[in-house]
Amino acid sequence: MVCEICLVEKKPKEGVPVIRTFGITKEEIGEKLKGIPFTLEETLSGINLYFQREEDLLKAEIALGDAVYSRGEALEEVVGGLLRDLGLSLSTAESCTAGLLSARIVNVPGSSDYFVGGVVVYSNDLKVTLLGVREETLRTYGAVSKETCLEMLRGLKSRFGTDCGVAITGVAGPGGTENKPEGLTYIGAFVKERYLVEERVFKKGRNGNRFLSTQTALDILRRLLSGEVS
């Protein structure tokens, strides 16, 4: 049975001041927000922080910096707003997530303003024929590698011609090997000439890993678009 939370971002509680975070642990949050009263809710989407006073929320936003992605909006909405405001186009290349990222992007009304489309390249053959990933790269490093992810991004840029792109390749599970365990995923994005590929090892089961891959991909793109990473 597929859990819904693995396929869509859980919305925070309504009617309470909230900031949404990703890529930061509750221990790190506790350290940064000493003296500020709040409650938290952990989800696959990240950690939602709730406040009784607006002034505490504002202090927390400053203290947490780029770990904060919104005051309630889903990450795909935040990214969509940035793309629209900047007038940039987006394409995607997905292996283990098999279209989940694209589906989340088009959950946002008006996404046709910036989203051109994407490819699901589950097989190595399609990585080669559709994105121009080199067979030598696949033989040397494997489909689940930083090198392959980077070539997927370059293929998007050259063949789709978009301003931005996101690529994901990994081992969703179940299974894996000693060198490439279950949950190992390479996730990358580019904005114009800036590229970023990151390695993650998720441990939330097949669909949980797939969701976290898309959440991480959107967050990497958000940080690139916001100029938070060079």
Image (cartoon, rainbow, N blue to C red):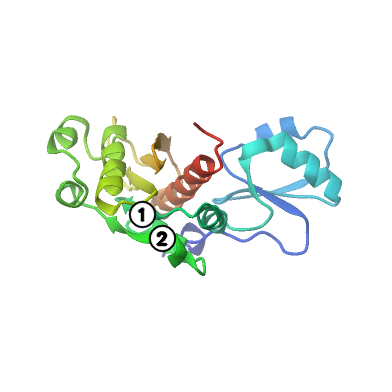
Q: x, y percentage for residue 53? A: 86, 50
Residue 23 lies, with reference to residue 84, above or below; the image says above
Residue 173 falls left or right of residue 67: left
Sequence-wise, the earlier of marks 2 and 1 is: 1
Residue 207 falls left or right of residue 35: left
Mark 2 lies on a secondary structure that is strand
Whole-Å distance between the Cαs marked 2 and 1? 6 Å
Residue 8 falls left or right of residue 48: left
> Which residue type carries mark 2?
Phe
Question: Which residue is nearer to you in this view: 16 or 163?
Answer: 163
Seen from this angle, which residue lies furthest bottom? 109
Q: Which residue is mark 2?
A: 115
Q: Residue at position x 58%, y 60% from top?
A: 10
Q: Which residue is mark 1?
A: 91
Are the residues tagged 2 and 1 within 8 Å (C-beta)? yes
Q: x, y percentage for residue 17? A: 77, 55
Q: x, y percentage for residue 142? A: 21, 36
CA neighbours of label 1 inside 10 A, class few (<14), some (14 to 19), many (20+): many
CA neighbours of label 2 inside 10 A, class few (<14), some (14 to 19), many (20+): many
Question: Which residue is nearer to you in this view: 75 or 144?
Answer: 75
Q: x, y percentage for residue 88? A: 45, 53
Q: Residue at position x 28%, y 41% from top?
A: 154
